[in-house]
Amino acid sequence: MSFRSFRTTARALVTGLVSALVLTTGVATAAPAAPAEEPTAAARVLTYDASGSAEFASAVTAGVAVWNESVANVRLTPAAAGQSANIRIIADNGWPRALRTSLGNGIVYMGREAVGYNTTRIAAHELGHILGLPDIKPGPCSSLMSGSTAGTSCTNPYPNAAEKAAVENYFAGSLAATGQLPGRQLFTD
């Protein structure tokens, strides 16, 4: 049995046991979860180059941390000097946007036109596109991928459960290796 099959079987068993516990006792207790900060054995590592992010550098660092805290099947790390990065992050004078060339690869533009919007939310949102997520418009502040439609008062930089699950699914097993999501796509917010 492969590690992936074992992990899937173990998750199903734990879910079944928790369901049985809830049915018999009426009390749900959360099983301890592995912290998402630590990549799993199957985590795909994506490198990023934020050297062109200018005044958005701290927002990019925070946006990367959001994703590294939120999902286990993919890990974002800075590219080493001279290394070709999967993701380039660039500040420009346009509106924030992402150009995904394939799953986990592309360019994030931290556009200066988004005056008044939370820059960490912008960085996490645009990285979400590179990780395979589409815009959800209109949408509530609880949805990271609602982007600008949540308004300038929305500061939530975290993906919701459905968004996390989608990224986990995209980077589980062969889908990440084949990049089966549509390739080159431009997302503007």
Image (tube, grey):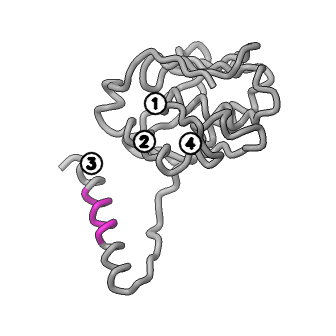
Residue under pointer 3: 3
Circle 3 SS class: helix
Count up the numbered dots: 4
- Report the magenta residues as a range: 9-16
Labelled pair 2, 3 in contact (Cβ < 8 Å): no
Q: Earlier in the sequence, mark 4 or mark 1?
A: 4
137 drawn magenta:
no
Q: Which of marks 1 and 3 is nearer the N terminus?
A: 3
In the rendered image, the vertical position of residue 74 relative to residue 21, given as above or below: above
Q: Which of 113 and 18 is in front in this view?
A: 113
Give residue 69's position: percent from left, percent from top. Answer: 57, 47
Q: In which quarter of the image is residue 108?
A: top right
Identity, as a three-letter code, of the amino acid under mark 4: Asn
Residue at position x 38%, y 21% from top? 182
Residue under pointer 2: 166
In the image as oriented, which residue stretches furthest toward the front?
138
Q: Earlier in the sequence, mark 2 or mark 3?
A: 3
Residue under pointer 4: 68
Identity, as a three-letter code, of the amino acid under mark 1: Gly
Circle 1 SS class: loop
Q: Is residue 89 left or right of residue 166?
A: right
Q: Is residue 78 left or right of residue 31?
A: right
Labelled pair 2, 1 in contact (Cβ < 8 Å): yes
Identity, as a three-letter code, of the amino acid under mark 3: Phe
Estimate how packed mark 4 is, as few (under 14), some (14 to 19) or many (20 or more) residues with alpha carbons within 10 Å.
some
Labelled pair 4, 1 in contact (Cβ < 8 Å): no
Let me know if residue 49 appears in the view: no
Find the distance from the CA under tag 2 to the CA under tag 3.
21 Å
Find the distance from the CA under tag 4 to the CA under tag 3.
22 Å
- Select label 4 or label 2 by which is in front: 2
Let me know if residue 53 appears in the view: yes
Residue under pointer 1: 132
